[in-house]
Amino acid sequence: MIEIADGVFIRRHAELDLTLGLVTGSGDSLLVDSGMDLALASEVRPSRIVLTHNHFDHVLATEAFLPCEVWAHEGCVVDESLLEERAKYYDEPFEGTLVAPTHTFRDTIALDVGGRRVDLHHFGPAHTSHDVVVHVPDAGVVFAGDLVEQGAPAQAGPDATPSNWRHVLDLLLELAPRIVVPGHGDPVDARFVREMVIPEAT
Ligand SMILES: [Zn+2]
């Protein structure tokens, strides 16, 4: 875990260059994406996980952190289709149980993490139909999920809406973040997001 702001951490993974986040408050913490590493649950015990979107690399390890609340946008579906996507990348089967969100929201919601405010926003479809942006106002940190990628181009699969992506990033930038944490890669600044190339649909 690397502390990028007061009580705000990231966990970088060699696998897919994935980046998870942890926001800590007084005696409480919130994990941004569960990722694929079940062992992380032996280090952190968040009371909540926020899933930025339903791609398998961001959600498969949720089971390891239970019991905890699992937050996502109301359009976030966690089902067997994720395992079909995963099978395109990995030969061995996934040994575990998929966990669906237990708490959802539509546009925005403010959570209290041990006395610390954390806002969840959905700014419309872009990388997926249901991307969640996690904002920690007192730290100036935004977790962008795969709306932003560093070190590799952002990815637009069949479930993406590239035509709305720039608009979504503009709304993200209105949060005036000091640090933007991508779903894959190292943290970036607002300028990186402004200049990021929006992928075309594949
Ligand atoms: Zn993704």
Image (cartoon, grey):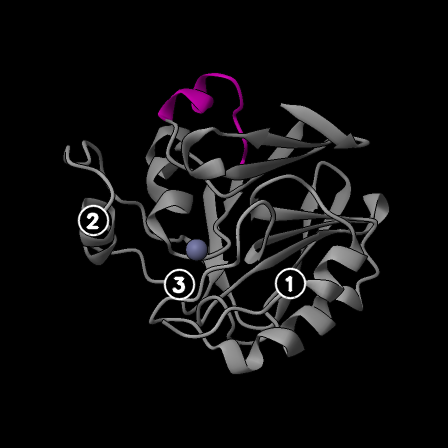
In the picture, measured across the screen, residue 76 lies left or right of residue 146, that is left
Figure check: 142 above or below 43? below
Residue 34 drawn at (x, y percent): 45, 38
Query: What's the distance in space between the residues labelled 3 and 2, CA to CA?
Result: 21 Å
Q: Pointer 1: what residue?
A: 109
Which amino acid, by three-letter code, is at mark 2?
Answer: Lys
Which is nearer the eye, 48 or 156?
156
Which quadrant holds residue 122? Answer: bottom right
Figure check: 169 above or below 147? below
Which amino acid, by three-letter code, is at mark 3?
Answer: Cys
For the point 37% across and 34% down, the residue is: 36
Q: Quadrant of the C terminus?
A: bottom left
Q: Quadrant of the N terminus?
A: top right
Ligand 1 quadrant? bottom left
Which numbered mark, 1 or 3, is in the foreground of this view? 3
Point out which mark residue 88 bears. 2
Which is nearer the eye, 66 or 184?
184
Q: Is residue 26 visible?
A: no
For the point 52% across and 72% down, the residue is: 126
Q: Report if residue 89 lies within the magenta region.
A: no
For the point 46% across and 28% down, the residue is: 14
Which amino acid, by three-letter code, is at mark 1?
Answer: Ile
- Kind of element beneath mark 1: strand
Q: Pointer 3: what residue?
A: 76
- Dot 2 surroundings within 10 Å: few (below 14), some, or many (20 or more)? few
**N-term mark: 3 or 2:** 3
Point out which mark residue 181 bears. none
For the point 49% across and 37% down, the residue is: 17
**N-term mark: 2 or 1:** 2
In this picture, which residue range is highlighted in magenta?
A: 38-47
Which is nearer the eye, 44 or 92?
92
Residue 51 drawn at (x, y percent): 48, 50
